[in-house]
């Protein structure tokens, strides 16, 4: 089965624990919680998505027929031949609809540490180096452990305390972007200050004007 990828680009990880770290982003096409079409947004399970993950027509995107072809495309986006510090963030869309052990092996073989951003509705393959799960209220969270739980805040019915028993190293609130971004940011700051187990994750790339 081929890997459908919207875009592959090099930037800084903007969010979460690795914010500021140079990374290739591999954005897989498709998601199980929204078609990606505006006409379907209101009846989607996840309604606040900030990302275009439809098709394979973005920068560096395409249909990769083997794990090696996918890993070669990721490697091509990395700026140097040196194997150190190589880092790829697999995102989407929902990457766990497509990312499998073979793809992880091919990326590791080219020296990449692999991070994944997932909505937590699919069991991850073995071998992910950094797993960031961002639960969506209204979907079933099946991934109960990982490196980072990054909750977009606020979500209706999404009181952060309902996630605290899960096995994550870091608990973060990320203000929901959109028309209410400033108010959401203030609310997230206030929640973290009252509940210090939670720390703030900003989408720093948006403030910096980078991809
Ligand atoms: C576009 S999603 C792709 C990965 C995966 N489908 C997921 O939801 O985690 C990447 C990250 O952006 C977050 N995100 C999406 N829309 C957002 C928004 N409007 N405001 C803040 N974060 C958002 C997601 O929660 C997730 O952590
Ligand atoms: N710079 C940058 N950092 C990010 N971290 C998570 C992103 C995502 O869309 O998954 C993202 C993104 O789109 N850009
Ligand atoms: S689950 Fe992730 S990719 Fe899918 S619609 Fe929500 S934020 Fe977007
Ligand atoms: Mg993004």
Image (spheres, rainbow, N blue to C red):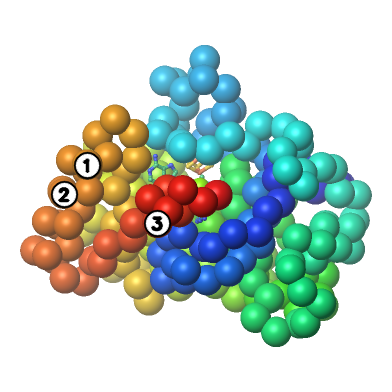
State the CA–CA distance, disc 3 to disc 1.
14 Å
Image: 104 above or below 206: below
The part of the image, by quadrant, that contains residue 136 is: top left
The residue carrying pointer 1 sits among few (fewer than 14), some (14 to 19) or many (20 or more) residues within 10 Å by Cα, namely: few
- Mark identifier at residue 204: 3
Contact? badges 3 and 1 (CB < 8 Å): no
Q: Residue furthest left?
A: 194
The residue lying toward the viewer, choosing from 157 and 196, is 196
Ligand 2 neighbours mark 3 (CB distance < 8 Å): yes
Contact? badges 3 and 2 (CB < 8 Å): no
Q: Residue furthest front?
A: 209
Q: Residue at coordinates 77% horizontally, 82% vertically from top-left?
A: 82
Instruction: Indicate which disc, 3 or 2, sits on the residue closer to the N terminus.
Output: 2
- Mark identifier at residue 40: none
Q: Is residue 131 visible?
A: yes
SS class of the residue under badge 2? helix
Q: Is residue 163 visible?
A: no
Q: Residue at coordinates 18% horizontally, 40% vertically from top-left?
A: 183
The part of the image, by quadrant, that contains residue 107 is: bottom right
Image: 112 above or below 139: below
Q: Residue 77, image x and y in percent?
A: 75, 60
In the displayed structure, does residue 39 sit left or right of residue 98?
left
State the CA–CA distance, disc 3 to disc 2.
16 Å
The residue lying toward the viewer, choosing from 188 and 58, is 58
State the CA–CA distance, disc 1 to disc 2.
6 Å
Ligand 1 neighbours mark 1 (CB distance < 8 Å): no
The residue singled out by tag 1 in the image is: 182
SS class of the residue under badge 3? helix
The residue singled out by tag 2 in the image is: 186
């Amino acid at each position: 089965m081929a890997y459908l990828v919207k875009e592959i680009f090099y930037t800084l990880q903007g969010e979460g624990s690795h914010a500021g770290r140079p990374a290739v982003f591999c954005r897989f096409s498709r998601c199980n919680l929204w078609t990606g079409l505006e006409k379907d947004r209101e009846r989607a399970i996840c309604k606040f998505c900030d990302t275009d993950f439809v098709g394979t027509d973005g920068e560096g995107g395409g249909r990769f027929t083997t794990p090696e072809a996918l890993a070669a495309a990721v490697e091509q986006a990395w700026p140097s031949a040196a194997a150190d510090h190589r880092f790829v963030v697999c995102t989407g869309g929902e990457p766990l609809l497509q990312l499998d052990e073979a793809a992880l092996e091919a990326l590791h073989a080219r020296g990449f540490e692999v991070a994944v951003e997932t909505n937590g509705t699919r069991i991850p393959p073995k071998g992910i180096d950094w797993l960031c799960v961002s639960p969506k209220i209204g979907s079933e969270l099946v991934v109960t452990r990982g490196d980072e739980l990054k909750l977009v805040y606020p979500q209706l019915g999404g009181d952060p305390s309902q996630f605290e028993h899960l096995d994550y190293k870091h608990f973060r609130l990320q203000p929901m972007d959109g028309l209410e971004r400033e108010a959401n940011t203030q609310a997230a700051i206030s929640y973290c200050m009252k509940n210090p187990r939670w720390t703030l994750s900003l989408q720093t790339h948006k403030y910096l004007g980078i991809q």
